[in-house]
Image: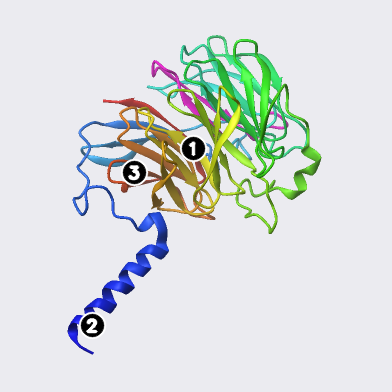
Amino acid sequence: MTRPLLLGVAVALVASAAAAQGPSARPAAGGTTPPAPPTRTYDVIVGAEAVDKMQVVRFGPAGASMVRERVIGKNGIDPDGPHGIAVSPDGRFYYVSTAHGTPNGTFWKLEAESDKVVGQTELGPFPATLQVSADGEYAWVVNFNLHGDMVPSSVSVVGTADMLELTRIPTCTMPHGSRLSPDGRHHWSVCMMDDVLVDIDAAKFEVARHFALAKGKEMGMAGPAPQRGAAAGAHDHSGHGMEPPKPGDVSCSPTWAQPSSDGRTVWVACNRASELVEIDVASWTMRRRIPTGAGTYNLAATKDGRLVIGTNKRGQSVSIHDAKTGAELARVPTSRRIPSGLVVSPDDRYVFVTCEGVGSEPGSVDVIELATRTRVATVDVGQMAGGIDVWRVR
């Protein structure tokens, strides 16, 4: 065989292999140019669920490292399980839900500079994802109820000044994800066992409408969601998002709801189906379903509205989608298995991703540069790293 023919065969084989790997094999924007080092310093707060640790990870011109940690919880025998994390808008405080109470979990308020506990209150069974309102006055926490019976659960609203639970709004079975619309009028959560997105009127503290997410049965409806928790046997209860679908399964098993930066749409992560569902807020209709990575779990969006990013819990990767076209621009492998939480930096330059790890593995925080779609740093943290939020950028 001649040299030109050999070269042609080699090029064809390389091209075929790259095509088979899908979006993860695409070169980063900018070709082979290495990512530029950060010019600012980013501090993020991370919760390690298995070891009850709150840790501060720093990424900046000097590199990436874990710079501080503290233990949180009440139970000295079993883990309390820090799950959801949110930093107050002014950066003075951070809030944590510890999920493994008996039977109920606890919501904590800590000073960001000192890690000093300044308040706490009991919520419902397994309080999980949370968000603080833009004015800092309210925290919205879903009561996931992972270890309870398959019965409807709720969303707690807490006044952050006095750390008092103001109301507990019934929603549906195993609620997860907790996000407020940019204008503060809507609270979005999803229910894994009922295949619905729930829209709470944030001014009235009551469910306004819901959206059915099963493939081929998508429909927006007024009022509270029907309670279908008894059908939970077909879903992944114990694995918490790790079970792939069986043949013929059209369920969504949603794990996250992420509003767009302009508030016109809500993106839902269908963990079981490995799809994103985009819903129009005004018309309350589905715009499209988009394939994504295996076991899509948590979502985030850039402030400029260009990108929607999701962790792929069964796929050990992060998917980056163009919000306008829905195209998957890249699928970036993570440092460890079971990627979980993520948060985009305020300047839209980086996304910080937690990985739980498996068995005796530590957790980790991966830093992905969005311009080049490249993982630029990894820091080991406590086991089962999950919740994460940006504290400050300097």
Q: Is 336 covered by the magenta stretch?
A: no
User: What residue type is disc 2 on?
Assistant: Leu
Q: Earlier in the sequence, mark 1 or mark 2?
A: 2
Q: State which quarter of the image contains the C terminus.
A: top left
The residue singled out by tag 2 in the image is 5
The CA distance from mark 3 to mark 2 is 39 Å
354 vs 260: above or below: below
Specify start and end residues of the magenta stretch as a single range: 82-104
Q: Position of residue 1 (x, y in %)?
A: 23, 90
Residue 66, picture quadrant: top left
The residue singled out by tag 1 in the image is 299
Q: Earlier in the sequence, mark 1 or mark 3?
A: 1
Q: Nearer the viewer, mark 1 or mark 3?
A: 1
The residue singled out by tag 3 in the image is 368
Q: Tell me, what colour scheme is on the image?
A: rainbow
Q: Position of residue 182 (x, y in %)?
A: 47, 19
| For residue 276, side relative to residue 245 (left or right) | left
Q: Earlier in the sequence, mark 3 or mark 2?
A: 2
The CA distance from mark 1 to mark 2 is 47 Å
User: Visible in this render: residue 149?
Assistant: no
| For residue 116, side relative to residue 240 (left or right) | left
| For residue 168, side relative to residue 281 (left or right) | right
Asked if the residue at tag 2 contacts the one at tag 3, i.e. Cβ–Cβ closer than 8 Å, the answer is no
User: What residue type is disc 1 on?
Assistant: Leu
User: What residue type is disc 3 on?
Assistant: Ile
Q: Nearer the viewer, mark 3 or mark 2?
A: 2
Q: Position of residue 61 (x, y in %)?
A: 21, 37
